Amino acid sequence: MLRRLSSGGPEVVVEYTDPVEGFRGWLVIDALTHRLCAGGLRVQKGLTRECITLLARNMTLKMRIAGIRADGAKSGIDYDPLSPGKDQALERFFRAIVPFMKDRYSVGPDLNTTMPELNAIAARFGLPSIKIAVARAQGFSDEEFASRIAILSRPAGQNTLASLRSGAGLAYACLGALDFLGIPSAKARVAIQGFGGLAGGAAWVLNQVGVKIVAVSDRQKMLRADDGGRLDVESLLSHSRNGLIPLVDNHGILGENSRIHEVDCDVFVPAAMEKTVMEKEAANMTARAVVCGANLAVTPEAEAILHQRGIMLVPDMVAGCGGSLSMAGLFGPGTPPEVQEVLDFVDENMRDMVNRVCSRSSITGVSPREAALQLCEEAPLMPGEKPYGPLGA
């Protein structure tokens, strides 16, 4: 199934070698079927062309299963995100990809980047937004696009819609999994691997609806609640810096971050890096479901073990659709929506996707990823249509 969906490889690859520091970067556009392609830009030490290519393919799958008439793309540089030269390194990389950003490539923040940071660099090249390609694809005037994109800066939770949207989508995927398993949110226990923007947003939304967050981790440590208790998510998020769990008194028990998959919970959420759930973790965890927020976080071998053990997996191509769905909720309506209307759109569509994938998996016996790939293959291609909104609009 995946071979059929990925035949031919990506249609565009831009390979960049920095003339100042020698690092490499890539823009991969998976397909040119539709007017628009979309995907995040990351800064990651050790990043490879192969990784960016897989991530671009994954973005195409997200578009297909979400019913968005766009293709996948991804970009990034092999660079230390903590280096003081990061901003200038990104600016130099932008020179190579700006022509695509103007007309086809809608950029989003990804690992170690933020929308304000990327927008500031785009402005140096005369672009009003890293998502200006959406205006061309949707046929928006400059004024109409500006009114829509400004909604991303409005308050949502503890931050803005722009910073919450992907994490909110992951939270709604968790709620969809709980719905399918018949577990009320007020009785659910969730452990989240990661404490950056994606993981933090998911934790905040889940906490708001009464889900008990029993453990979180960052790149240094794990924090779990006392037996039967819950973490004070709002306090932890308010004191967090750089995606690290703050060391605040009376906020749980510290442990090794590599052992978070062993925490007793209903749903385990990998929301940090790729390849963080491997065969050993899959064989030992006790969760009833794994909701994969980070791209490629669960290896194929681990997925097979989870399926054999009867642990439901919501794959990354589904649970990671929050950002893409939020764009459909933002740009699809005939008039500019309110923030809550965008989040409600993501909530409704994410739960529906989770239910469709898990139902097909349950009925046919195939793994949830195989079920999701089948749904992707069945999705019609509509090259002449706008990416977002009703057909023919």
Image (cartoon, rainbow, N blue to C red):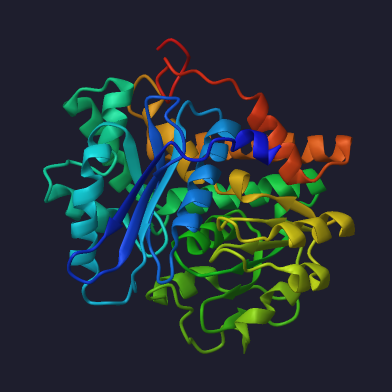
Q: Considering only vertical position in the picture, is 303 above or below 213?
A: above
Q: For this rendering, which residue is in front, 63 or 116?
A: 63
Q: Can residue 225 be seen by looking at this rendering?
A: no
Q: Considering only vertical position in the picture, is 83 above or below 91?
A: below
Q: For this rendering, which residue is in front, 46 or 190?
A: 46
- Which residue shows up at 71% across the image and 58% down it? 290
- Quadrant where the C terminus sits is top left
Give the side of residue 219 with respect to residue 302, left or right.
left
Give the side of residue 117 with respect to residue 2, left or right.
left
Q: Considering only vertical position in the picture, is 65 above or below 189?
A: above
Give the side of residue 339 with respect to residue 352, left or right.
left
- Which residue shows up at 55% across the image and 45% down it? 58
Residue at the far top: name it: 392
Residue 277: quarter of image: bottom right
- Quadrant where the N terminus sits is top right
Residue 355 place in picture, x, y as percent: 73, 37
Residue 213 place in picture, x, y as percent: 64, 67
Q: Can residue 216 be seen by looking at this rendering?
A: yes
Q: Considering only vertical position in the picture, is 239 above or below 315?
A: below
Give the side of residue 299 with respect to residue 193, left or right.
right
The number of numbered discs placed on residues in the rendered structure image is 0
Q: For this rendering, which residue is in front, 97 or 332?
A: 97
Residue 241 place in picture, x, y as percent: 38, 76
Residue 381 place in picture, x, y as percent: 54, 21
Residue 159: quarter of image: bottom left
